[in-house]
């Protein structure tokens, strides 16, 4: 349930902030961020920051490893491990 | 084989495939291998100005294998393409043809680097099918066939070009004295150049109130992770020395974990710099500087251990009168 909600929000964030015009209607777990969706290494880092800011998920800086998020499925797995950000942390970001 | 440096991976794989010679000492110093700075002062793992010649000369000294450039920077892309095709036509079995191409233009290959462009060295040869080439890519541990037109297009996609011919008919083993000298020549116990440069870039961005300021960090540290993988070269040194010193597998693994922590430290630094560039939140600056201090501290520990192991190795192999027991004792904080 939460995974599907994240999937929808992730697509919104990618379309709005990474200006990816050719995203499929639904992101599939097997889609590769770089080869299939055109997300380069910097965009991937930006995407994680947007996940933190827009989706209000607390990303532990010491655990971010861009090489681990090869596919949409891997990125969603990672997002499901994150805690929601407390309100004062959002304001401070 | 650990992914560290594509040119070195190609050169080392040739030694591995064609001989029993130990290629690992060639990786000494790769952890601090030179990098370039872009026009805007950002980190760059590739630049025309960055010469591989010292590395190629050392390869010949160590293994007796000559590497020559086939690419002519003064010639047109078409001329260089013809040179490559001719070299492949005339290639004897012991010869390897290395090309530089834009990896992100090669269909069907996953790199995990997500860089565009992504200059990368690999080796090619012809197959029975004139439209297909055999691609030998040790750095990504991949070999297989690819459409010749795709490979040529990926080569042409880069603004600059490069390529080498390696004649590996006869491979010799370096003397222990030569291995020792290469370590001493490349080991820099007093400086961690990559971390120092990241800190300098950060300080400059922090002080730049007129220009792009912190926003510039996005581009300037964009290639940090590609450079950080070179730190895995420490593992080759540890493996090489431990064979002589008789250290345990557990001892190696503890230091390998330190190297992993070092690589993660750079991932953290890159993520924080992107966040800083996007948000402009200066409260992140001290956290990022602290992270760089941690990265430095980890690398000093690793260097201290590698330096200690090198001394012990040297005493064991170059000074037969030295006491073997003292030389081979496991030590270091993580040990």
Image: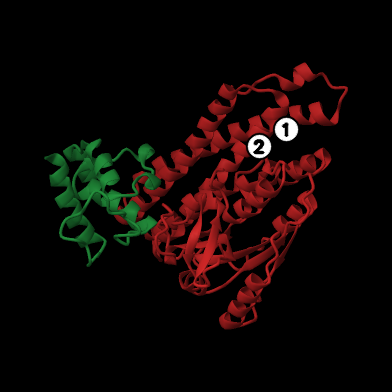
Chain colours: A green, B red
Sequence order check, earlier mark of 2 and 1: 2
Image coordinates of residue A27 in percent, x first then y, are: 20, 54
Count of marks, rendered view: 2
Describe the element under mark 1 as helix, strand or loop.
helix
Considering depth in this image, is B33 or B115 the residue closer to the camera?
B115
Describe the element under mark 2 as helix, strand or loop.
helix
Considering depth in this image, is B66 or B218 the residue closer to the camera?
B66
Q: Is residue B291 left or right of residue B36?
A: left
Q: Residue at x 39, y 43 (%)?
A: A65
Residue with the most extreme right position: B321
**Labels 2 and 1 touching (C-beta < 8 A):** yes
> Dividing the image into 4 quarters, which one contains the N terminus of chain A?
top left
Q: Residue at x 26, y 61 (%)?
A: A18
Q: Residue at x 77, y 41 (%)?
A: B179
Q: Residues within 10 Å of mark 1 (few under 14, many from 20)?
A: many
Q: Is residue A30 left or right of residue B91?
A: left
Q: Residues within 10 Å of mark 2 (few under 14, many from 20)?
A: many
Image coordinates of residue B139 in percent, x first then y, are: 54, 51
Please give the residue where the numbered disc 2 appears in the rendered image: B237
- Spatial CA span between label 2 and label 1: 9 Å
The chain letter under disc 1 is B
Residue with the most extreme front position: B128
The chain letter under disc 2 is B
Please give the residue where the numbered disc 1 appears in the rendered image: B310
**Image quadrant assignment for residue B320:** top right
């Amino acid at each position: 349930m939460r995974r599907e909600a994240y999937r929808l929000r992730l697509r919104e964030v990618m379309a709005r902030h990474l200006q990816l015009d050719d995203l499929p209607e639904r992101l599939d777990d097997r889609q590769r961020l770089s080869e299939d969706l055109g997300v380069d290494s910097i965009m991937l880092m930006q995407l994680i920051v947007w996940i933190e800011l827009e989706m209000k998920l607390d990303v532990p800086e010491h655990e971010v490893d861009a090489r681990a998020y090869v596919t949409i499925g891997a990125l969603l797995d990672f997002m499901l491990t994150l805690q929601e950000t407390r309100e004062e942390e959002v304001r401070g970001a | 084989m650990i992914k560290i440096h594509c040119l070195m991976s190609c050169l080392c794989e040739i030694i591995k495939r064609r001989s029993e010679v130990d290629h690992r000492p060639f990786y000494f110093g790769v952890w601090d291998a030179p990098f370039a700075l872009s026009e805007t002062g950002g980190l760059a793992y590739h630049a025309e100005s960055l010469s591989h010649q010292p590395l190629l000369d050392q390869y010949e000294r160590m293994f007796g294998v000559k590497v020559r450039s086939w690419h002519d920077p003064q010639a047109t892309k078409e001329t260089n393409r013809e040179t490559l095709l001719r070299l492949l036509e005339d290639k004897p079995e012991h010869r390897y043809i290395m090309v530089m191409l834009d990896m992100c233009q090669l269909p069907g290959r996953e790199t995990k680097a997500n860089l565009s462009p992504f200059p990368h060295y690999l080796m090619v040869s012809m197959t029975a099918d004139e439209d297909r080439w055999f691609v030998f890519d040790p750095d990504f541990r991949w070999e297989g066939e690819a459409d010749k037109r795709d490979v040529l297009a990926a080569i042409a996609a880069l603004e600059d070009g490069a390529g080498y011919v390696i004649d590996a008919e006869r491979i010799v083993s370096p003397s222990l004295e030569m291995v020792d000298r290469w370590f001493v020549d490349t080991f820099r116990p007093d400086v961690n150049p990559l971390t120092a440069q990241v800190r300098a870039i950060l300080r400059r961005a922090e002080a730049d109130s007129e220009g792009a300021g912190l926003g510039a960090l996005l581009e300037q540290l964009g290639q940090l992770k590609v450079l950080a993988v070179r730190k895995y070269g420490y593992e080759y040194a540890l493996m090489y020395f431990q064979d002589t010193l008789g250290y345990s597998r557990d001892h190696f693994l503890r230091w390998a974990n330190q190297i992993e922590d070092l690589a993660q430290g750079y991932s953290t630094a890159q993520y924080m710099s992107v966040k800083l560039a996007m948000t402009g939140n200066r409260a992140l600056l001290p956290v990022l500087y602290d992270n760089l201090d941690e990265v430095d501290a980890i690398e000093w520990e690793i260097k201290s251990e590698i330096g200690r192991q090198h001394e012990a190795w040297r005493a064991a192999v170059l000074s037969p009168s030295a006491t073997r027991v003292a030389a081979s004792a496991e030590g270091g904080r993580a040990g």
